[in-house]
Amino acid sequence: MQSKKLYLSDRDKKIAGVCGGIAEYFEVDPTLVRLLWVAFSLAYGSGLIMYIVCALVIPNRAS
């Protein structure tokens, strides 16, 4: 069995590829991940900070 790894998305990239990468990892629609991320950001206020952290921490696929 091949282990899955989380990478920033190259194919479905809007800003930094974080939501697209998460969607590829969990095999769900990227739009759903983006909507959940926006809802989380509006509800708890830390979504933007978490997005920036994820964009810095999650590696690119080429790395």
Image (spheres, helix red, strand yellow):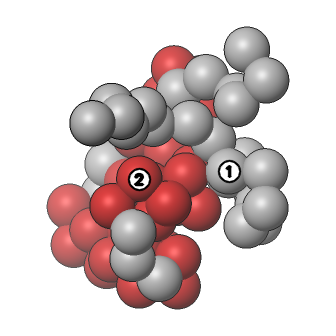
Image point (68%, 50%), residue name? 9
Q: Quadrant of residue 36?
A: bottom left
Say whether residue 13 is left or right of residue 42.
right
Is 58 positioned to the left or the right of 35 in the image? right
Indicate the position of residue 45 as horizontal and vertical percent values: 30, 57
Tell me what residue is drawn at x 49 percent, y 45 percent.
Answer: 51
Amino acid, disc 2: Tyr
Answer with mark 2 or mark 1, whichever residue precedes in sequence. Answer: 1
Front residue of 8 and 36: 8
Q: Would you say 54 lies left or right of 8 here? A: left
Image location (x, y in percent) of residue 41: 35, 65
| Circle 1: element type | loop
Q: Which residue is mark 2?
A: 25
Query: Label 2 to label 1, Cα distance in Å?
Result: 10 Å
In the figure, 41 relative to 38: above or below?
above
Which is more toward the observer, 13 or 28?
28
Q: Could you tell me if residue 32 is visible in this image?
A: yes
Q: Which residue is mark 1?
A: 9
Q: Secondary structure at mark 2?
A: helix
* Neighbours of disc 1 within 10 Å: few (<14), some (14-19), many (20+): many
Q: Amino acid at mark 1?
A: Ser
Q: Position of residue 29 (x, y in %)?
A: 47, 82
- In the image, residue 7 lies at what x, y percent? 56, 36
Mark 2 burial class by Cα count in 10 Å: few <14, some 14-19, many 20+: some
Q: Are marks 2 and 1 in contact (CB under 8 Å)?
A: no
Q: Is residue 39 above or below residue 10?
A: below
Quadrant including the N terminus: top left
Asked whether residue 52 appears in the rendered view, the answer is no
Which quadrant of the view contains residue 44? Answer: bottom left
* Total numbered labels: 2
